Image (cartoon, helix red, strand yellow):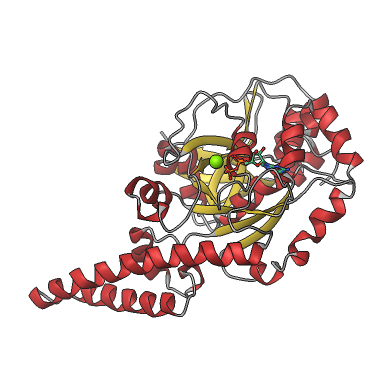
Amino acid sequence: MAGSPVAPALANGPAVACETESTKIPMKTGIIGLPQVGKTSLFKILTRADISHRSNNPREAHIGIATVPDDRLDRLAAQCNPRKLVHAQVEFADCGAIGQEALKETAYLSNLRGVDALVHVVRVFADDSIPHAAGSIDPVRDISNVEFDLMVSDLGQVESRLERMKKDLLKKKTPELEKENELLLRAKAFLETERPLREMEMTKEEKKVVRGFMFLSEKPILYVLNISESTTLGVDLEAAVDKYGLAAYAAKPNTGVSAICGKVEAELADMSDEEAAEFLGSYGLTESGLARLIRKSYELLGLISFFTVGEDECRAWTIEKHTRAQDAAGAIHTDLQKHFIRAETVHWDTLLELGSEAAARAAGKLRLEGKDYIVQDGDILHIRHSG
Ligand SMILES: Nc1nc2c(ncn2[C@@H]2O[C@H](COP(=O)(O)OP(=O)(O)O)[C@@H](O)[C@H]2O)c(=O)[nH]1
Ligand SMILES: [Mg+2]
């Protein structure tokens, strides 16, 4: 990505309306971790939420919305000068400290079950004035412990569901029940070997059934190492995953790893775009950890963006990977999906290069795609529809 990292196009680009409009939030990410690791601090800067006035009940999740930074959209907006610029968004929930006890509480559990993915904040930063739940810095240990708690909770749920199913199967055997029973037995065996369900191979159909149970260890997870501030922060962030033994985690299915310096991110949050870019540069960084983290959780959720551009509005729309053009149109409006004819399509960088949709059309670069076209990340769509 070119240019300065923090909303580069906007810094010197067009004046645009702020993004206050309510949009459909497709996915929610839950922030979990041991006590005093920086969850709430991270949540606040992610969502720019002021939660000081909220309740102190530790079991009440804070919910907030983060804007997904997108340099591509910023550059398109700088070119077409729209009245409105709307980035994609994801929802975050600060779920509170995790542990065996918390996981037995209905409120905590239901908050956690309701999210689509997890961000597990792991403490690396050293600060003697802030006690560590386990007494020392050891990310792999902390991750294993939390993972274990998630799996124990799931195992309990699997077992009670299997119990009930035994009775149902005695009453009446249906192919669906038998299939579900078989799947749960497989999940049980998997958990008993201390492997989280997100690593279990499943067909699309099985995955759908399992999703219905909202198992905790099945959710995609991003481990985020919260490291100390240092003069060599850029290098330290780069090296953190290896240094703390997390490289092997990155290769696991539905799993991501990242590092952040909460303290620096908190300072960045109060700066202007120019100040932030300069500050990041002084640490040898080209983008904020926050931007990277939001993008990574977006990816982990299997989400991509397509754009619509125009004088009125430049906007990112969130869809799952492998979405057909007709279904993608539904992200904008159900009528567009229903009356879909075709999608005039051009990739974002082609449009940027050619300067406008009209120029792209003149150059023969606007493709006419039908309803079964699989929309790509960064496509610009113009939906043609009847009625
Ligand atoms: N030194 C340092 N302190 C931090 C960092 N992140 C959070 N803290 C401090 O750690 C304490 C706990 O942070 P908090 O976000 O409430 O943690 P939570 O219990 O996980 O929600 C607070 O005093 C924070 O100021 C960090 O990156 N570096
Ligand atoms: Mg907290």
Q: Residue at x 81, y 42 (%)?
A: 353
Q: Please determine whether, in this image, residue 207 is positioned above or below residue 104.
A: below
Q: Residue at x 78, y 27 (%)?
A: 271
Residue 205 visible in the shown view: no
Residue 22 percent coordinates (x, y): 49, 28
Pick the front one: 369 or 49: 49
Q: Residue at x 41, y 37 (%)?
A: 335
Quarter of the image where ligand 2 sits: top right
Q: Please determine whether, in this image, residue 220 is positioned above or below residue 326.
A: below
Residue 82 percent coordinates (x, y): 68, 24
Q: Residue at x 81, y 57 (%)?
A: 238
Q: Quadrant of residue 158?
A: bottom left
Q: Quadrant of residue 20?
A: top right
Residue 387 visible in the shown view: yes
Residue 361 percent coordinates (x, y): 71, 40
Q: Is residue 334 left or right of residue 264?
A: left
Q: Is residue 384 left or right of residue 232?
A: left
Q: Exactly how many numbered labels are in the figure? A: 0
Q: Is residue 372 left or right of residue 44?
A: left
